Amino acid sequence: GENVEQHPSTLSVQEGDSAVIKCTYSDSASNYFPWYKQELGKRPQLIIDIRSNVGEKKDQRIAVTLNKTAKHFSLHITETQPEDSAVYFCAASTPNAGKSTFGDGTTLTVKP
Amino acid sequence: EADIYQTPRYLVIGTGKKITLECSQTMGHDKMYWYQQDPGMELHLIHYSYGVNSTEKGDLSSESTVSRIRTEHFPLTLESARPSHTSQYLCASSESGGGNTEAFFGQGTRLTVV
């Protein structure tokens, strides 16, 4: 089955700096890669996703890149703010899999 | 408003009791999932369903069982609760067909077994 590895497990940055979280996946058939943000005590919520026919996607300060050849994808957050502090999960899913495989999460702390 | 609802939000129960965690969604989704998550930690898939009368075990072995008699309802049952079951349980749903899509999560049930 699919295996997703996520790095780093913890990340601390200064407000205004950029943050990058990386994930690798094992199944070359995976075609959908969502990123979820989970604030303390709240439910995970989708912040951005990318499909395998696209190499990059941006939404304001957030971007995701996908390298299908290397089987890795990354989340980029620019101009970080304290409210970006949360746990971020990447995931990958294959067609008709019925489920996504999640990475283990990255705890991002943005220091004011 | 379309959403996914979990009850109870918090539950403290004694060892050996039978419990059912409720999950309902009004989003019209076919796929539903149960995850176990300790605070701030990994999401472990314990059960999922493609639709009515479909249930599958997830990646994490669990002593719980699920049922899917109605599209909108996906309850999880523990026949005999133990302290090792203490955790947060998150229910989620997503659309099916036409490729994979975003999962919507419920608020979670925080279970404590004493």
Image (cartoon, coloured by chain):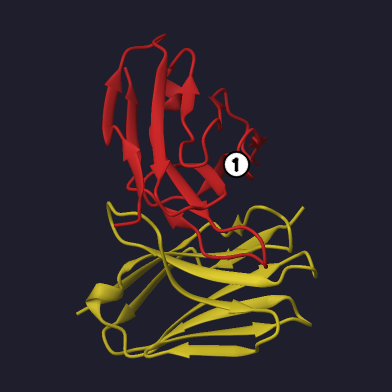
Chain colours: A yellow, B red
Secondary structure beneath label 1: strand
Residue sitting at x 65%, y 87%: A54
Amino acid type assigned to the residue bearing label 1 in the image: Tyr
- Apparent side of residue A97 relative to residue B82 in the rendered image (left or right): right
Spot occupied by residue A101 in the image (x, y as percentages of width and height): 63, 56
Spot occupied by residue A104 in the image (x, y as percentages of width and height): 54, 56
Q: Mark 1 points at which residue?
A: B48
Residue situated in front as seen by the camera: A111 or B89: B89
Spot occupied by residue B79 in the image (x, y as percentages of width and height): 49, 14
Spot occupied by residue B76 in the image (x, y as percentages of width and height): 48, 29
Label 1 chain ID? B
Count the numbered circles shown: 1
Above or below, A79 against B2 in this view is: below
Residue sitting at x 27%, y 23%: B12
- Apparent side of residue A44 relative to residue A9 in the rendered image (left or right): left
Above or below, A89 against B71 in this view is: below
The quarter of the rendered structure image containing the C terminus of chain B is: top left
